[in-house]
Amino acid sequence: MECKRENFEQEYKREMMAVQDSMDVLNGKWKISIISSICYYNKRRFSDISKDVVGISNRMLSKELKELEFNQLIKRTVLETQPITVQYELTDHGRSLQTIIKNLTAWGVEHRKKIIGN
């Protein structure tokens, strides 16, 4: 019986570590909103994301985009236009978050209805 309890504890610790890893990558006030903006439109320019994510400063947006790029969730492409345009899109790894974003959105809609109605 003790063996099962030990396996349970090990599995629990492994799962909690995975949750913490996920939270470390997606932490902060803005990352989920930034990913959602890019996810919804497939490709977004910096200024478009800035308009979508209400309240974020350009400096913070730049920082968050760099972190998302570092974690291989988004890809940054510089287009040779005049003036130069920078475009962001989800990587394959980033697209793996789409189901989570959709589920989070659905939960948010239901939660809003429960708390404030309609």
Image (cartoon, helix red, strand yellow):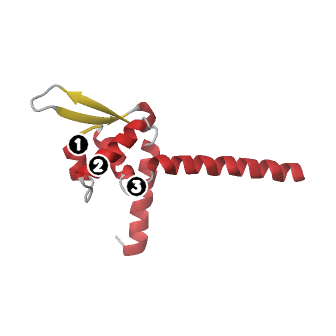
Query: Mark 1 sits on what residue?
Result: 46
Of the residues tagged 2 and 3, which is closer to the observer? 2
Where is the C terminus found, in terms of image quarters? bottom left
Q: What residue is rendered at 28% in x and 41% in y?
A: 41
Q: Residues within 10 Å of mark 2 (few under 14, many from 20)?
A: some
**Residue 114 shows in the view:** yes
Label for residue 10? Answer: none
**Residue closer to the observer: 101 or 14:** 14
Per the image, the residue denoted by label 2 is: 61
Q: Tell me whether the residue at label 2 lies in contact with that at label 1, contact meaning CB atoms closer than 8 angstroms.
A: yes
Judged from the image, the secondary structure of the residue bearing numbered disc 3 is helix
Q: Can residue 73 be seen in this view?
A: no
The residue carrying pointer 3 sits among few (fewer than 14), some (14 to 19) or many (20 or more) residues within 10 Å by Cα, namely few
User: Which residue appears at 10% of the width and 33% of the height?
Assistant: 83
Is residue 52 positioned above or below 96 on the image?
A: below
* Residue placed furthest toward the top: 80
The mark that comes first in sequence, 3 or 1, is: 1
Using the image as rendered, state which of residue 24 and residue 95 is in the foreground.
24
Q: As displayed, is residue 16 above or below residue 77?
A: below
Q: In the rendered structure, which amino acid carries the disc numbered 2? A: Leu
Q: As shown in the figure, which amino acid type bears the numbered disc 3?
A: Thr
Which element carries disc 2, helix, strand or loop?
helix
69 sits to left or right of 81: right
Q: Which mark is residue 105?
A: 3
Task: Give 65 or 113, whichever is nearer the viewer.
Answer: 65
Residue at x 87% of width, y 48% of height: 3
Q: Which is more N-terminal, label 1 or label 2?
A: 1
**Distance in Å between CA atoms under marks 3 and 1:** 23 Å
Seen at 27% across and 54% down, the residue is 53
Q: Which of pointers 2 and 1 indicates the residue nearer the eye?
A: 2
Q: Position of residue 109 (x, y in %)?
A: 39, 61
In the picture, measured across the screen, residue 66 lies left or right of residue 84, that is right
